[in-house]
Image (cartoon, rainbow, N blue to C red):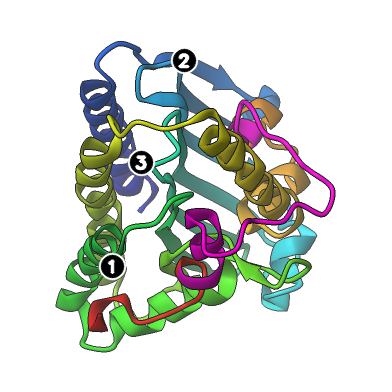
Amino acid sequence: MINQVKQYLLSLQADICEQLEAVDGSALFIKDKWKKPNGKGDGLTRVLTNGTVFEQAGVNYSIVHGNNMPASATALRPELAGRSFTALGVSLVIHPLNPYVPTSHANVRFFIAEKDGEDPIWWFGGGFDLTPYYGFDEDCIAWHQSAKDACDPFGVDTYAKYKQWCDDYFYLKHRDEQRGIGGLFFDDLNEGSFEDCFAFMQSVGNSYIKAYRPIVEKRKDTPYTDQQRQFQLYRRGRYVEFNLVYDRGTLFGLQTDGRTESILMSLPPLVRWEYQYKVEPNSEEERLCSYFLKPKNWLAL
């Protein structure tokens, strides 16, 4: 199981990085191979910075091993207590320079937890989501259509189920607002055979760049003002808040003594907060909050 998933993940990482480099046209990803001591894992972190299109893009592959599942996992699934585990995945976050190009995130992962004398417990998880700063209906519709296309071969209700889970997951409770316009989120997937679950994870992983690249190419040359850039930096603060307070992957990585540089590569290079910031009524910024950041059935528009 692990070898099959590993080969796919490394291929996916390479393909996504190659396509993002082609879109940016100037900057390239650095490759940072790393290894944890005592055989606890290794990985390949690839980061692009200060590009023409992407201010920072991180695409990380990692595989980690541990003797005990962390608290963030056993709290949700007590049956995992006392088991050793292997976790591997690709996780990425793309922070564009132009405020009209949305930030995007994707992750696909596989876990297997083992204990002597008992059957292994395994599952897949992942998804992708989009965080615009200036929204366009057509981009949101195209993004969700790609998500639905990835799900349709696996059941008529699959997209609706994982779209709702994504809306519920990427929600900042302390702000009472969504992080973005959603996409897909799934976890603990082990219904049916390994092959079927693996095929679904691959469908989601392969769909990400097909959904994101056309949006980037459409918006990357849109003129913008310093005021719009400042709004982008302010809204990036929400991204930081979510990743440090709620994100399961961040918590899991830190609780399993993960590689901090790779875990926190999801954070934007520049960000700002402003006390009691208010958007102007009837502005594009106000419409982001009042319209785009409200969960809706984008495919029914």
Residue bearing the label numbered 2 = 50
Residue 40 seen in the current view = no
Q: Position of residue 139 (x, y in %)?
A: 27, 57
Q: Residue furthest front?
A: 281
Residue bearing the label numbered 1 = 144
Tell me whether circle 3 and circle 1 mark residues in contact (CB < 8 Å).
no
Secondary structure type for disc 1: helix
- The image quarter containing residue 36 is top right
For marks 3 and 1, the one nearer the N-term is 3
Q: CA distance from mark 2 to mark 1?
A: 29 Å
Q: CA distance from mark 3 to mark 1?
A: 27 Å
Q: Nearer the viewer, mark 3 or mark 2?
A: 2
For marks 3 and 2, the one nearer the N-term is 3
User: Which region shows up in magenta?
Assistant: 264-291
* Residue 279 lies within the magenta run: yes
Left or right relative to 268: residue 112:
left
Three-letter amino acid code of the residue under disc 2: Asn
Mark 3: few/some/many CA within 10 Å (<14, 14-19, 20+): some
Q: Residue furthest bottom?
A: 157
Does 48 sit above or below residue 294?
above
Mark 1: few/some/many CA within 10 Å (<14, 14-19, 20+): many
* Most common SS among magenta residues: loop
Left or right relative to 120: residue 20:
left
Determine which of the numbered discs, if any, sits on residue 6 in the image.
Answer: 3
Look at 22% across and 30% down and name the residue there.
19
